Image (cartoon, rainbow, N blue to C red):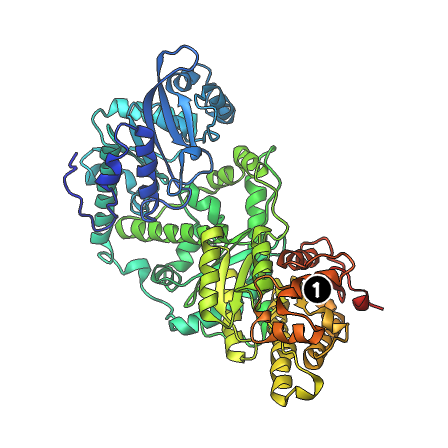
Amino acid sequence: MNTQTTNFEHVSYLWDEEKASQMEGNEVDLLIYRSNILGSDLRITNYGGGNTSCKTTELDPLTKEPVKIMWIKGSGGDIGTMTRAGLAGLYVEKLRSLKNVYRGIEFEDEMVELFNHCIYDLASKAPSIDTPLHGFLPFKHIDHLHPDAAIAIAASKDGEKITKELWDGQIAWIPWQRPGFDLGLKLKETLDNNPGIRGIMLGGHGLFTWGDTSYECYMNSLEVIERASQYLADNYGKKRPVFGGEKVKSLSPKERKSQAARIAPILRGLASSEKSMVGTFNDSETVLQFTNSYDLEKLAPMGTSCPDHFLRTKISPLVLDLPANQDLSDAQDIKEKLESAFDAYRKMYADYYEKHKHSNSPAMRDPNPVIILWPGIGLFSFAKDKQTSRVASEFYINAINVMRGAEAVSEYVSLPLQEAFDIEYWLLEEAKLQRMPKEKPLSRKIALITGSAGGIGKGIAEKFVKEGACVVITDIDQERLNETLAEFEKSFGKDVVLGAKLDVTDPESLQNAIKETCLKFGGVDILVNNAGISISKPFEDHTQKDWDRLFNILVMGQYNVSKAGVEVMKMQGMGGDIVNIASKNALVAGPKNVAYGSMKANQLHMSRLMAAELAEGKIRVNVVNPDAVIENSNIWEGGWAENRAKAYGIDVKDLPNYYANRTLLKESVKVEDIANAVLAFVNGMLKKSTGNMLNVDGGLAAAFPR
């Protein structure tokens, strides 16, 4: 094979010789390195797609004799992010000896349990169903990848013929077959019948390539994928326009995002009829080329071919029968129009289940669509969390690429429905789902917190993310917002956090924040009104400007943010939570605090009124009243601390002790105490509680409600 050229047009050459040289002699480290750089290019394989392996010689811990060990990506892993902990290490000869007890293709599932008897490394990840596909091949390094270009050929009507001609017989062909022990045996048989080949194409599935070294394997994979990619590129538009040409015109990027943000909460609510879902929106050129095409009507119902695509995107997408410029001002009218489309999809899915189920099939899962296509606008995906919905979106884009390529060189062939069902409801897949860890209390929830780049708001945001929520961090201070967002992304990843500049007194700023939230996550379930300022002055010294500023930020800010959030919640039809951060000053008449205390009392009573009115829509409104939370708070800037100390006749440095000692518990109130109180209202334990308030002040008798 040619390993001289490192200039590729359709894949990225990422091998760093200096890095690799530091791993020389350590084949497992080189496997991980190769896997990571392959997995970083979505044209080569998507998240969780494919697997890689290497074989080494190790000392048996019992016999002290050298033995051959295979290291392979474990079940449920991702090669792009794989570490040593994600590998399974198995005795090669023990794995191969399982053919002596193999009872035939109808007994495939029982073989997976036997893989555990072949484990060499006791810290192994559970071996995947693809383990024998690597185990029976003799090569030291093997890549099994799902490149769009290769699958396009593999999923085409003339795939076998194209494969043979394109690589001059150097890539063999195996017709579609579900992964398992029998397919592993067929790979070995195919190699034996075609000595000297450089790879094997699996019909409708993916590509196997190999090499004597990690680098040779890497180069072999890139060269084969590059050849397939170039072949497709040479044929796009050759016999007919891509996807038959454009049927629908896209709106402008700004208009698309505006339409998407408006309809996303409605779609989310309908897609969440069984369980709450989190959304992703994509309006890339690849998506629009497909959704706007004449072939959409023919290809979309056919579904995907590669099992990895199918498992994440469901049997087929839902295509919205709405013009791109549809007036969305009447949300209820749009919801009624779409309900029939969702009902039809659920019925289609139920029919698919009933027609293809077996006597031991698991119960039917959520019948709602995962992928929703809107011609002229883009693609929506909905799943249990943000990462899963984003990955589903990426996999459907892979499927689009596959369909485009297959149609360019031949004719696209999707997975037969019975095969699709058998994979989706595979008992081994069901067992994997049952082993998934229990969801966190705020899993599937989307929370927007005002004033959350620091202090109490930041503490609440951090608590929510740790409890499973997707969080929108907002603040009026862009620099502070950027710093907090970077901190959260580093700690929790980019999927679960969004930063949006928000001035609660500015309607345009508010609408932009809501729009960004709906575009990234699909809607909102929890609003925490935390943004605020404090002004402490004697009664006679307060100005009209003081009163107006406090009123606009604390009272109207709470009202405006809640109003915008409630609109989204009602579009979703899933209820929701609003928690307003007021203060013990809403209940206690303190010195030099008339304007601030009045606004806090206003916030508190507005919350009660909101609770009474919004309960019909299952939207709960509750209040947390903190006191004297000095930790990381902007409230003490701008003279507030000095004024409070002066009001109490003490030095500023003595304020923390003063506040702690005046409480019944004699303890300072921390940011985490407030975050825990807010969590208590929204984590499901108090789901029948609304119109309530919770004082978190260390115990102040003067603030006891009565």
Visible residue check, residue 221: no
Circle 1 sits in a helix, a strand or a loop, which is it?
A: helix
Residue receiving disc 1: 659
Q: Position of residue 245 (x, y in %)?
A: 31, 63
Few, some or many C-alpha atoms within 10 Å of disc 1 (few <14, some 14-19, many ≥20)?
some
Q: Position of residue 615 (x, y in %)?
A: 74, 67
Would residue 122 be found to the left or right of residue 336 on screen? left
Would residue 2 be found to the left or right of residue 155 on screen? left
Q: Position of residue 261 (x, y in %)?
A: 50, 68
Specify the quadrant of the image occupied by residue 603. Answer: bottom right
Would residue 396 be found to the left or right of residue 692 on screen? left
Q: Nearer the viewer, residue 24 or 101?
A: 24
Q: Nearer the viewer, residue 598 or 265?
A: 598
Specify the quadrant of the image occupied by residue 642. Answer: bottom right
Note whether 619 is above or below 356 in the view shown: below
Visible residue check, residue 426: yes
Would residue 494 be found to the left or right of residue 526 on screen? left
Note whether 243 is above or below 314 in the view shown: below
The C terminus, quarter of image: bottom right
Note whether 136 is above or below 335 in the view shown: above
Q: Residue at x 51, y 24 (%)?
A: 113
